[in-house]
Image (tube, rainbow, N blue to C red):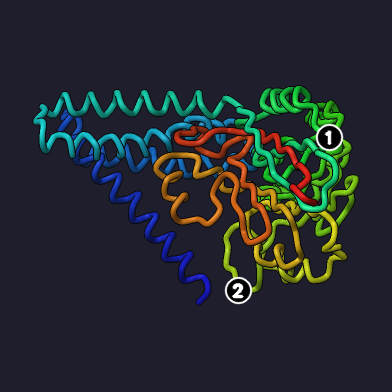
Amino acid sequence: MAYIGIIFMAILFLGMIAGGAYYLSKRFSQFFPVLSLKGWLLIFIITTTATVSGSWFSADSPGVIGDILFYPGTVWAAVLLYLLSSLVIVDLVHLVFKMSPGIRGAVVLTMTALIVSYGFINTSLIRVKEVTIPIAGLTEEITAVHITDMHLGSFWGRNRLEKTVEKITEINPDVVFNTGDFFESKEYFTEDSGIPELLGKIQALHYFVHGNHESYVGVEDAVKQMKDAGVIVLRNETTMFGELQIVGLDNMREDEKEVSGHTPAGPDTVKSVLEQLPIDGNRPTVVLHHRPSGVSYMNGKKADLLLSGHTHGGQLFPMALIQEFSMPYNKGLFQYENMDIYVSQGTGSLFPYVRVGTNSEITKIKLVPESGS
């Protein structure tokens, strides 16, 4: 019974794809009658299927066949989304300002090309976002960097990581917090990946917890790569950084009631693990967990701050807008009772590699003593 909601959403998603493909085909057969409705429908079905298939290939990098499917799909999924969005807008405008089919088709293609081009360029840029968070019990300011959702794989690679390391080095933080989905592919688990050398350039202590994509491609391999780079991997553990207590949690359900396709179905939950960990409620405490979930249980342990990622802020409009209203913690800084929550939009991006309405970010966080503490 718990999975009925997930099944329903999957059916709804497929239905929307099918409806969108038909809507596009019907209009394109009017705008560009060189092909019939059936011809356009066949094209949109093939390209949509290839796009979905290409996204699956990114984890295993199977070679030429995978590349043929994967690389066009890195933007084609966004093209399909904005073809549909632009078409809806043009059809609405056409109700008031009448246009010929050819003009309407040209406007749809132009809008889509401009939006996708902007989104492709935008996702390639890494912006540094600065946030100041007061922490009770802290006596000295700490400059931290938060990175998450790098998604190293078939698309983002060494160049992306080099840019990230350069920006972190420029910030010169006291500590780096990495909340997972660093790897999207097995491609970077090889000895010549260069990951240890690049991450080794970061002078600050670097703490890492894994995300759902490490679970897909191999948690143990990911952990080995990070440890080889001198990164401190926390797996349901606590540690100290000066006067700051750090709690690092595996990516898992918040409690036994949660049903999620992004976490393993094992017995461990945020609730059960926090009950067993030796957490000192009198110390300033930062929790690292890939997803912004289990907040009430962390607050119950008197945590001061949760750092998470996973959401990408929605990555693409209108999903970014939908998530703002549908998710309690989508992107940015929030507060739950006495605890702050910061959810990064992600340092990388996910298939399709386009950002509209969101930014790829590295977060510079100043942890400062709370007034009066």
Instruction: Give coordinates of residue 114: x percent, y percent.
Output: 37, 23
Q: Please name the residue that numbered disc 1 is placed on.
A: 174
Q: Is residue 373 above or below residue 346?
A: below
Please name whichever residue, 284 or 45, is drawn nearer the observer in this view of the structure: 284
Q: What's the residue at 63%, 42% (across, down)?
A: 59
Earlier sequence position, callout 2 versus callout 1: 1
Q: What's the residue at 58%, 25% (across, down)?
A: 125
Instruction: Give coordinates of residue 207: x percent, y percent.
Output: 81, 44
Q: Amino acid at mark 1?
A: Asp
> Quadrant of the rendered structure where residue 274 is?
bottom right
Residue 233 in view of the camera: yes
Q: CA distance from mark 2 to mark 1?
A: 38 Å
Instruction: Give coordinates of residue 151: x percent, y percent.
Output: 64, 38
* SS for dot 1: loop
Position of 285 with respect to 261 (left or right) is right
Residue 257's disc is 2
Q: What's the residue at 69%, 61% (across, down)?
A: 252
The residue at the far front in this view is: 372
Position of 201 with respect to 19 (left or right) is right
Residue 225 in view of the camera: no
Please name whichever residue, 62 or 98, is drawn nearer the observer in this view of the structure: 98
